[in-house]
Structures are given as C-alpha cells and as structure tokens.
Amino acid sequence: MDERALKQQIEEMRQQNKELTDLVKTLNGTIVELQETIRELRRQLNQNSQNSSKPPSSDGYNKPSPKSQRVKSGKKPGGQMGHPGKHMSIPHKPDEVRQHLPEKCKECPILSECLSNGNVFRCAEKRYVVDAVIKTVVTEHQTMCAEHCPNGNRKLIGIFPENVNAYVRYGDSVAITVGLLSTYGAVSAIRIQSLMKSMLNISISTGTIISMVGKCAQKVAPTIAMIREKLAGKEVCNFDETGVRVNGSLYWVHNSSTPDLTYQTVHTKRGKEGIDGNGVISDFHGTAVHDCWSSYWKYNDVGHAVCGAHLLRELTGIAETYPDHKWANDYKNLLLTMKRTKDKAIKKGQTELSYYHKHKFDKEYKRIMNLADSECPPPQSSPEKKRGRVKRGKERSLIDRLMTLKNEICLFVHDFKVPFDNNQAERDLRNIKTKNKIIGCFRAEDGAQNYLDIMSYLSTGLKHGIGVVEALSAAFAGKGNIVLQQGF
C-alpha cells in the first residue's frame, strides 16, 4: 500500500472515530435526559397531599399514612391538666318534673295520705333527660271589618302586616331553617324537601328553597360589606383560592380572612382579575399571607408572607425523590425549629426573638442554601441550544425560590403577628369542597355567590362565638352587625 492510500485510510478512521465520539456524547446526553424524565415521572406518580400541593381528596383509596411534622411531646394522650373540659349540661329549668316513688309504696293502701303529707317523701336523687320538640306553628291573620261604627263611619277594614302578602306564605323561621340546611348544613335541595316534609309537614318546592337562600343572602348583605371593609384595614390577612363547578364550568372562590373575619367571592378567573373581583387586597396595605401563587406578587403596595406548610410538603416531595440530597430535610428542620422557637417565645410573653436566635437562623439558612447549590447546581446552558430558557427542574426551581424569597418565608419569626402557615384561609375554604361534592355544581353564579355570602356571614359569627341560628335570625331582624360586635 502506498503512502497516499495509507494517509487516506487513516483520515477515514479519524472521521469514523469522531463520528462515534459525537454519537456517544449524544447518547450520554439522551441517557441523562431520560433519567431525569424517569425521575420526574416517578415524582409525579408518587405525589399526594403530604408531599405536594394536591388536596387530600385527590389521594383516593391510596391515602398515605399520616406523617405529622410535629415532634412528640412525651405527654399522655387525651385532655391535659388545666384543660377546660366539656360536658352535658341542662339548657334551662325543667319544663316537667316526674317523681318516681318506691315500688312498695305504689301498692300501699295509705299512699294517698302519705302524698298529702309533704313531710313523708323527699327527693333522693335528680336526673335529667333533654329532648327536642319540633313542631309547626300556623298563625291565622284576619282583617276585621267594622260594619256598624258608632261614629257614623262607613265600613272600616283592617290591613294585613306588610310581610303577610299572600293567602299562605312561609314565615322567616322557615326561611332561616332552609337557608341553614342549604349552606351551613350543605344539604341538597331534594333532601331539604324531604326533611321539611317529614319533620314539619311542610311541602316546599326546590324553586322556593333557592328563593329562600337568596332571601337569606339579601339579609346578610349589609354585614358582608362591613366585613370586607374591616378586612381591608387589618395588619395581616390570609388569602387563598379554590376551584368550584358552576353551571358545568370551572370557577374560582377567592377567600380573604383573618381569625375573626371571613369574606369570599366567586369569579371565572383564578388570577389577578379574580383577586381584584374579591376586592379586599386592592384596598389592603398590611401583610398578605398566601401560598406563593404568582398573581399575588403583582400587588406591590402590600407585604408578603409565604405559607410554611406548603413549603414543608414540597420539601417532603424533594426528599423522597432525591434521597441522597440532604438539604431538603435540613431546610425542613430549620423551618420547624424556627416555628417552635417562636411559639415558645410567645408563651413567655415575648414580642420578638432575641438577636442570638435571629443570627443563628440566618447563618443556618445560608449554610443550607450553599449545600443545596452543591447538591443541585444550576443547569448550564448548552452551546448547541441557542433559544429558550434552560430547564431547571422541580428541585432547582424550589431552591431558587427559597433563595429569592428568604425575607418573605422567614417573616413569621421577625413579625409575631404573621402566622407560620396559611391554614386559616384553607380552613375557611373547606366548606366549599363539602358543598360541591354533595350538589355536584352550582346551577348559576348568583346561587354560588349567595352561598358564599351566607357562609362568610356565619363563619364570622362563629369566630365571635355566635351560633348560626342566632346569627341568621339577627340578620332577619335587621341586627346583622351582631356578628361584629363581640370581641374575638
């Protein structure tokens, strides 16, 4: 073989070697991408309400075993010393007294003489039975006609009260009962029909039931406006949203609440348009506690605090997906330690943490973020990829968020008025899920808003220690602001 042919053969081998090297690099990159895809799919498959933001209702029959973030206190289960226990009590003085004589005395021939003598028997022991009597009261209204007036006036006829405007109508107590069953009781219209018929012998149509709920909403409307105004002036307020079906479409319930107030509205949009429709945060200048939904960050005139409970669930998911990464568990421990330290300080009557604890937590935060950077570094852009952002993945996205929002995440330890989590808003929204499961969906947006107005009113009353019957009865009497008068 001559020298020229040998060089050509060597050049061809080099070209083949280069092509094989490029192919290996491409395959290695594909393998890395596939491994990441498999890991992401496994993460999604293993998601549940305890390691993500998915609601508990989505767990189905594969509900995970409880994994509480609380540390065992070592105390025995049950009520602790000093706990104000509850017990059965007599609501009022007895309506009827029944006396039970000894068996032998019942057959005694001189029993009547003993009963007439007040000194023979005495009460040995008292016991009470509390029963409930449900009955219907029908009131007949008659207009009287004066046919023979001594003053010479011609026929005079009385007039019916303003609320007696039909031959047969239901009183306010019926409307209150129906309204409470439909809203607070989360009972469907068909079952309300059955209950009213069997308990009170009242035949009522579904249309009348809907009208009565609307009437209840009208009665509480003035108080609802006051609740909204009071929320806008609060220092700290919890915000959240949840989906609801209305006329077959997905709507969103927007919640604004505090430990003593609740205000909810329904809207077709989840984002800023729906939040503006709720109206509270637009006039709010305090600290908004939320679950980091991006739309809330568009409000620059308010402070922001991120829900720690949501972060704990996300960190649990990261720790389960990447067991060799230690930063997620370290961050969880830091959050829980900060919460416990704050709770202990509040019990001692303190209004802020010491400089020692603040400095210690800040130093630990930086250490964990440096560890996260080393265990999951930012992705490097490929020279071959010229357009678009580099995909960061779930873990790196969370790390970047924790670095960027450090002040908002840790605000609860610097300002004791700010809660650790957004559970207040989530508790206030829970009734929506119960109602939606029972009825399937609301037939109209007005019906959904009527339900939310009544529940906002009743929830505010309960937070002030006012029962739902008392609160709604007060609204019909024009005294709805009673739910705002008692101190929380």
Image (spheres, rainbow, N blue to C red):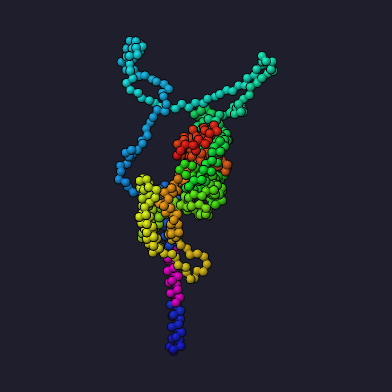
Main SS, magenta residues: helix
Quadrant into which the C terminus falls: top left
Residue at the far bottom: name it: 2
Residue 442, given in percent of the width and then of the height, sits at 55, 42
Q: Is residue 428 left or right of residue 118?
A: right
Q: Residue at x 68, y 18 (%)?
A: 155
Task: Name which residue lies at 40% across and 51% down.
Answer: 413
- In magenta stretch: residue 20: yes
- Against 324, residue 100 (above or below) is above
Q: Is residue 421 magenta?
A: no
Q: Position of residue 279 (x, y in %)?
A: 55, 47
Q: Position of residue 454 (x, y in %)?
A: 52, 38
Task: Give the residue at x 56% y 24%.
Answer: 139
Query: Vertical placement of 338 versus 91: above or below?
Result: below
Q: Nearer the viewer, residue 457 or 398?
A: 457
Q: Position of residue 242 (x, y in %)?
A: 50, 47
Residue 67 visible in image: no
